[in-house]
Amino acid sequence: MDVLLIGSRGREHAMAIALKKDERVNNIFCIPGNGGLAGIATCIKMDIFDFDGIVEFLDANPAIGLTIVSPDELLAKGLTDLLNEKGHRAFGCSAKAARVESSKEFANKLCEKYGIPAPKYKIFDDYMRAKNYLKTQEFPIVVKTDGRTGGKGIVFCRNMREAENAMYDLMVAKLFGASGDKIDIEEFVKGEIVTVMAFSDGKTVVALPAVETYRRVFDGNLGMSTAGMGASIPAVSYTTEIEKTVYEKIILPTINALREEGSEYKGVIGFSVIIGEDGAVKVVDFISRFCDVEGQVIIPLIETPLLDIINAVIDGKLNETEVRVKQSSGVCVVATSGGYPLEYNKNMKITIAENIDGSVSLFHSGTKIVDGELRTSGGRVIGVASFGNTKEECASKVYANISKISFDGMHYRKDIAK
């Protein structure tokens, strides 16, 4: 059987590596792919928003027995639904289910209706009303775009001035386009944030180990929020007791709530969870697919063949499948283009030293091949990951090798898992 991956991030690279090990998988295609995926898959130059073109490609390649849809914008626009309607077996949640990520308003109302612990919030589509509301609030506070921004439209505001500036950037200056037509003003919850991803077939939910996430662009968790500067596993604060609480109060209730709302969730779902100083947990964001950077430290540790899990999810038989995950530490650090998550230059030549350690994994995101040369094509360029007995050991190996990668403007955090 052949498999088609749709996407161009590190998570697709990690999935392709996992699928390549499966003897049942003959060929892997990727739309559009990247410079790293080109080494293990056939990359097809096609606009990912050309849904008709994707259907035509699948019609012309009947050996493709599975299509994995990863990008959240494609899930929200209903690509999985379309492919299934056209008779192509596709993995990824439906457009209705994807609203947990594509609309903060939908997600917050879902939590409110079904008693899922989440921060207090207020949605606004009018700048002046939002500004007046701020005068009644205590700081710090969090301002988010209602629409999807890949994790970048989240601003932590310490005072009124920062909050007003954030609202202006999102609602008036349209820093993230139409995603800022509405904003979500949330209470700030103090605590440690972890990401928990899970497989769901609509009824059965299997949670994966929690991952520590590093979203701010600069060391010390400073600067703008990004889609991820790094990740590490295990999450020390995610005790057995916390794990049980998150599953019973957040993960399972969310899947049940979506089913009740006619939005059965089949695919991978992610939860950004804050663990408060008192041990209380709240979900602050939902993700409708494998997270990118977090996926780069969890996908390689999944021991059950990925194809078996995906088929079980699609067929509603996840309760019959044992999802095994290797007990290991892991660290991933992302090399980004200078200026990310705002404006940055592309097409920078990437040099990777020949003596880079073969035991570390390089997961490409924003890369492409131009005239035989590897060049940058996005904000998050390459994730460097290592797995071993301790996070300290993994971090040491990652930092010893990320310095062997270079391109103009390259930036990465120096404090991940340290």
Image: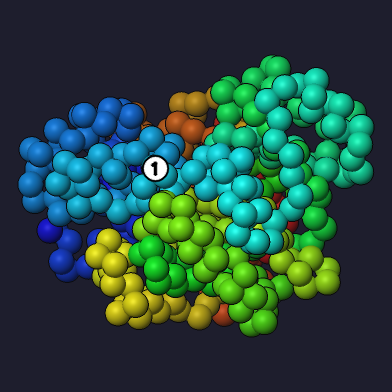
Q: How far across and down, in percent of the image, does residue 361 sit?
A: 45, 60
Q: How far across and down, in percent of the image, does residue 85 sit?
A: 20, 43
Please tell me which residue is depicted at 45% across the width and 78% down the height of the picture. Answer: 326
Which quadrant is the C terminus positioned in?
bottom right
Residue type pointed to by label 1: Ala
* Location of mark 1 (residue): 95
Q: How far across and down, in percent of the image, does residue 328 sit?
A: 52, 77
**Image position of 327 (left or right of 316):** right
Label 1 crowd (10 A; few <14 / some 14-19 / many >=20):
many
In the rendered image, the vertical position of residue 339 relative to residue 319, given as above or below: above
Residue 235 occupies which quadrant of the picture? bottom right
**Image position of 275 (left or right of 306):** right
Please tell me which residue is depicted at 62% across the width and 35% down the height of the picture. Answer: 146
In the rendered image, the vertical position of residue 196 relative to residue 66, given as above or below: below
Q: Nearer the viewer, residue 132 or 22?
A: 132
Which quadrant is the N terminus positioned in?
bottom left
Q: How far across and down, in percent of the image, does residue 98 sit?
A: 45, 46
Please tell me which residue is depicted at 14% across the width and 50% down the height of the picture. Answer: 64
Please tell me which residue is depicted at 80% across the width and 55% down the height of the picture. Answer: 189
The single residue placed furthest to the top in the displayed view is 173
